[in-house]
Image: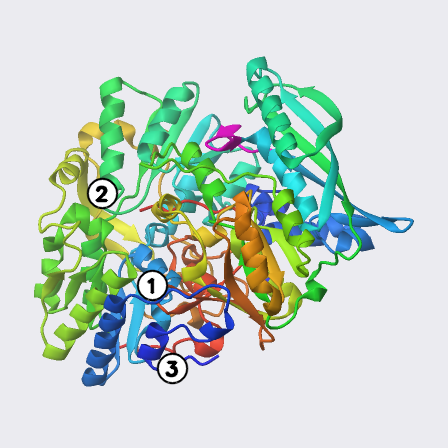
Amino acid sequence: MHTVMTSRTHSDGRITLAHGGGGELMGHLIQEHILSALGNPALDVLTDGAVLRSGTSRIVLTTDSFVVQPLEFPGGDIGRLAVCGTVNDLAVMGGRPLALSLGLIIEEGLEIDRLDRMLRSIAGAASEAGVAVVTGDTKVIERSTGGGLMLNTAGVAALDDGVHLGFDRVRAGDVVLINGPIGDHGMAVMSVRHGLEFETEIVSDAAPLNGLIQSVLLAGIDVHFMRDATRGGLAGVLADVSERTGMSMEVHESRIPFRRATRAAAEMLGFDLLSVANEGKVVLVVGADDAGRCLSVLRQHALGRQAAAIGTLAAGTVPMVELVTTTGGRRVVQRPYGEELPRIC
Amino acid sequence: MTRNASPAAKAGTQRRGAEMAPVASGAVSPAFAAELAGVHDLAARIGRQIQLMEVCGTHTVSIFRSGLRSLLPPNVRLVSGPGCPVCVTAQRHIDAAIRLGTIPDTLIATYGDMVRVPGAMGSLQEQRGRGADVRVVTSARAALHLAGLFPDRHVVFLGVGFETTAPATAAVVLEARRLGIGNFTVLAAHKLVVPAMLALLAGGRVRLDGFLCPGHVSIITGADAYRPVVERFRMPCVVAGFEPLGILRALSALLRQVQAGAARLENEYSVAVSASGNQVARRLIEEVFETAAAPWRALGEIPESGLRFRPAFRSFDALERFGIVLGEDEDHAGCRCGEVICGTVLPTECRLFGSVCTPLRPLGPCMVSSEGTCSAWYKYGTPPAARAPALEAV
């Protein structure tokens, strides 16, 4: 009976944009198609990068592609994103990034001046992260939408002894922290895309987080788990932690940092700020004993001045993230389910 | 987790706050705590089950997102009404929109939610996967802009929504006429809120004690638009803003009327809503559109509830331009969206809810739309154990 009912809306055996939205639909694509064809122990864990062994040392390998439109937005551009995205994926695995590769897919017609700007931006972000682009590839494709430029970066990092991160290390009573205000990247891109102007410009938070994260690890804080809250936003990461650990999580809305202008923009378009993308935010899970110290180390870094402890994990009966709202009410936080769309009125 | 703690304990303190050592917790504002205590006091004094309808989808989402729903007294039940633009759009208009998307060289410009509503030929999103040019816009102006950018294509703007979006549609149609833009038409499916509220009451399908009236719509129509609801049906009406405190104040006002056995029109959103509304916007609607009977999901054809082009503007009517005749409304079997928007069932009472109908694969518009009641229940709803019991229908 159910087969018949769902067939009408089952996307007709074709990929839709929502499959790439970072939500539940994308999860299905990865699980049912990609993993079923390519699955192996290193891939199956679906972490931000793969941990590989070479003799006694461990390295992390990751890759990411960037197709953002528009290419440039307040606070960043596709070049900066391509560096930050890969560096952050390595950093949240606990790795010290060693080198990056860069694949350029350039559409016929892209202005060379524009390409130069993107390359300068890549160089700038790489230098901030203290990592070099050491290999690359360039392809030019026929003009299609006039979109211009797509990038792929891959990166390797060294994983130091003593760094052990994973869902399996998360314990009841652990504290969840974030390094600053949420939603800036998504709303910066969205405001350009939709031609919205606000009194205060919303600026993407795109930034390499490896320095911040290394400062936490070097301070001897035993981080149990980390993830950068990109597509799917903070909600996506929190839902993952809860689901993969089987624990419940209580998060306090009043402690989640945000900028007023960003929240106003999100409300105007009907978005839940918790589900809006970031490019310079990391969620850390640490033991309650370490939480205070972790917070003060984060706040000493330029990218962690507004860091906050936002929630705790508990050995609940159902793996569920509950938000205690600023009104004192409660609601469930779920992983966003695909392409988030602005509301009508 | 306890859900039956006293309201003061819930609102005034953050439970388990002590476990969160690293930062101090933010306190709930005293004004909010006081208003909430007032709501509980009124509800206790009224004693019986009270059923209030929030008409607007933005209210529904705000009530869920802010956690307000979890704080209300057990005998105050909020049901959602016919105020989500996509949800009330009749299936025949959705099918027509999807058909327009299949016409070669057309470009469909639409507000986001419409992209995912399933129709007889799949959704616009699926049509986009097959090559249709479907673009999400956040304004009618952006749709007209597309017509300028792509002179070789015909841009069809899906004109859905209430009095909030209709003035913008009217404005761009006037603009298109002034500029002589020939590759731009509108699927005119705009609707008016008050006739639907009246039809709902006249149908007698749901027992209500009052309406929490929409904020955005009222900015355009003015609060006085609800007078017929108050006068003809002796139904308390309170216009509310979207902040949790504003919503709570409006709920207090409704409960005070219920307790006193009164039926008045009150405006708790006077900072934005006047008695007579936005005259400029109303004139724009008036100039381009005329009221006509319109099909609503579940409510059927309601007299004077829709906006159609005046004869002078018929050349902008996409249906006329492409010779598309509206078909029948074939709703998905088993889908109870129609009853949900009439407030006669809660989403959880639909057999499809959360099982085969999810935001991932929505079968009905109330699950598709970010303003939809089912979507709000699914996304923010408390776990099944804490959900409200089945509601009273007449």
Report the number of numbered marks.
3
Task: Categorize mark 3 by other alpha carbons within 10 Å: few (<14), some (14-19), many (20+).
Answer: few
Tag 1 near tag 2, CB within 8 Å: no
- Residue A4 visible, this angle: no
Q: Amino acid at mark 1?
A: Ile
Q: Secondary structure at mark 3?
A: loop
Marker disc for residue B63:
1
Q: Secondary structure at mark 2?
A: strand
Q: Nearer the viewer, residue A282 or A300?
A: A300
- Label 3 and label 1: CA atoms lie apart by 19 Å
- Label 2 and label 3: CA atoms lie apart by 48 Å
Q: Image quarter for residue B74? A: bottom left
- Residue B245 visible, this angle: yes
- Residue behind mark 2: B307
Q: Amino acid at mark 3?
A: Ala
Q: Amino acid at mark 2?
A: Leu
Q: Is residue B49 left or right of residue B267?
A: right
Residue B257 in the image: state x and y as whole percent: 13, 73
- Residue behind mark 3: B5
Residue A120 located within the stretch drawn in magenta: no
- For image coordinates 19% across by 37% down, the residue present is B289
Task: Categorize mark 2 by other alpha carbons within 10 Å: few (<14), some (14-19), many (20+).
Answer: many
Q: Earlier in the sequence, mark 2 or mark 3?
A: 3
Q: Image quarter for residue A111? A: top right
Query: Residues in magenta?
Result: A67-76
Does B99 appear above or below B8?
A: above
